């Protein structure tokens, strides 16, 4: 009965305006799942996962690097069978841009094939990680519906962002003209929190609505933005060993991450995907030079886990002992 209800919900979702095929697209609604497709890992369980999962990553330069970092973290956590099911990398993309590959309008360079759709339709993905350019969009709805059709136990994660330009301006494309003037060190934590809270509210609402359409909590939030804000607060307070300024987290004023922020995101994704704490895991090789600091590594693990267990839409629930 649950399976019938899910398929009916998906049918309604795919047929709704939010799931309409983009103009000019040749994509048709998929015919149905293959026999036996999908993993046995149940999305409704909140128990820690010890079996390796097949994780496909879709996104841009603020996200796709998480795939190899997550692989190394999983290996260090004693999960040797973790698999990178694939990576679809499209620079400066919305999730809808990635959905439209290879037929996206206005994109002069894009992958020749949509390997994410192919993997999903083969039932070879347990977790699909997505990252809006910062604002969520209907590409999330479309990927989630397709994934669930071929693997009813799939989980889709949405990377909650740290804010480009340190402000929340819900418009696209981003005003890159601000890049030369953004000073990440000038931002105060109260100012940042005000912008972040508005952004978190909008992301939560969007994902909540997607799950309501799907009839299950298949789409989860990876609270990287909340962990980033917590780390920046530690930096300002002088409590982040090896990191002296907020600007050290970013490669440019726009906010492309440096190694510490990439690793922090990796820990957040590990915690959501495997429902396990990263605290105590060995330091990943990405932390080099002055960032190769055990105290810093531990701090980021703790901040990532704290953000995940306190986010109501991460899919991770921790009960008091």
Image (cartoon, helix red, strand yellow):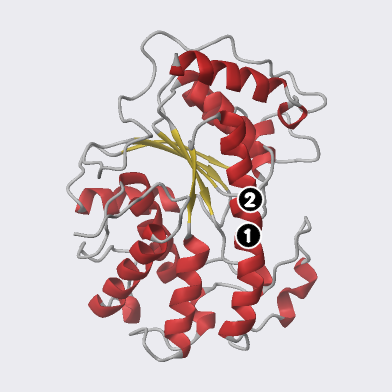
For the point 38% across and 50% down, the residue is 272
Please rate how many residues cluster around mark 2, counting C-alpha atoms within 10 Å: few if below 14, some from 14 to 19, many from 20: few
For the point 24% across and 60% down, the residue is 320
Inter-mark Cα distance, 1 to 2:
6 Å
Q: Please count the marks in the image.
A: 2
User: Which mark is on residue 201?
Assistant: 1
Q: In the image, residue 208 lies at what x, y percent?
A: 58, 44
Contact check, label 1 and label 2, Cβ < 8 Å: yes
For the point 49% across and 87% down, the residue is 245
Compared across the picture, whether 23 is left or right of 141 comes to right
**Residue 148 vertical position relative to residue 173 in the rendered view, above or below:** above
Q: In the image, residue 312 lies at what x, y percent?
A: 46, 54
**Residue 86 vertical position relative to residue 89 in the rendered view, above or below:** above
Compared across the picture, whether 321 is left or right of 32 comes to left
| Element on which disc 2 rests | helix
**Residue 70 vertical position relative to residue 142 in the rendered view, above or below:** below
Is the N terminus in the top left, top right, bottom left or bottom right quadrant?
top left
Question: Could you say which quadrant of the image residue 32 lies in?
Answer: top right
Question: Could you say which quadrant of the image residue 56 lies in?
Answer: top left
For the point 74% across and 34% down, the residue is 104
Q: In the image, residue 79 lies at what x, y percent?
A: 21, 43
User: Is residue 253 in view from this perspective?
Assistant: no
Q: Which residue is mark 2?
A: 205
User: Is residue 146 in view from this perspective?
Assistant: yes
Q: Which residue is more in the foreground, 287 or 160?
A: 160
Is the C terminus in the top left, top right, bottom left or bottom right quadrant?
bottom left
Compared across the picture, whether 15 is left or right of 81 comes to right
Please rate how many residues cluster around mark 1, counting C-alpha atoms within 10 Å: few if below 14, some from 14 to 19, many from 20: few
Q: Which residue is more in the foreground, 46 or 297?
A: 46
């Amino acid at each position: 009965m649950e399976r019938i209800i899910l398929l009916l919900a998906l049918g309604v979702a795919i047929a709704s305006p939010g799931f309409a095929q983009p103009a000019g697209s040749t994509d048709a609604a998929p015919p149905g799942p293959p026999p036996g497709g999908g993993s046995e890992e149940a999305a409704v369980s909140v128990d820690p996962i010890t079996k390796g999962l097949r994780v496909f990553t879709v996104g841009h330069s603020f996200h796709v690097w998480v795939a190899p970092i997550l692989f190394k973290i999983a290996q260090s956590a004693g999960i040797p069978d973790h698999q990178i099911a694939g990576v679809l990398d499209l620079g400066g993309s919305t999730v809808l841009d990635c959905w439209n590959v290879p037929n996206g309008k206005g994109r002069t360079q894009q992958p020749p094939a949509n390997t994410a759709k192919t993997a999903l339709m083969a039932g070879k993905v347990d977790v699909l990680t997505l990252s809006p350019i910062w604002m969520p969009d209907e590409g999330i709805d479309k990927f989630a519906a397709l994934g669930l059709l071929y693997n009813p136990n799939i989980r889709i994660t949405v990377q909650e962002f740290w804010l480009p330009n340190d402000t929340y301006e819900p418009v696209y494309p981003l005003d890159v003209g601000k890049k030369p003037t953004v000073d990440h060190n000038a931002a105060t934590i109260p100012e940042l929190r005000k912008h972040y809270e508005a952004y978190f509210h909008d992301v939560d609402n969007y994902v909540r609505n997607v799950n309501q359409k799907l009839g299950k909590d298949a789409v989860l939030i990876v609270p990287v933005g909340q962990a980033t804000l917590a780390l920046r607060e530690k930096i300002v307070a002088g409590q982040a060993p090896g990191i002296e300024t907020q600007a050290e987290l970013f490669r440019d004023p726009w906010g492309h991450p440096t190694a510490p922020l990439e690793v922090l995101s990796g820990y957040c994704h590990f915690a959501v995907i495997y429902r396990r704490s990263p605290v105590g895991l060995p330091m990943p090789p990405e932390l080099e030079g002055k960032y190769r600091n055990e105290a810093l590594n531990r701090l980021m693990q703790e901040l990532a886990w704290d953000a995940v267990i306190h986010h109501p839409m991460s899919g991770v629930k921790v009960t008091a002992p």
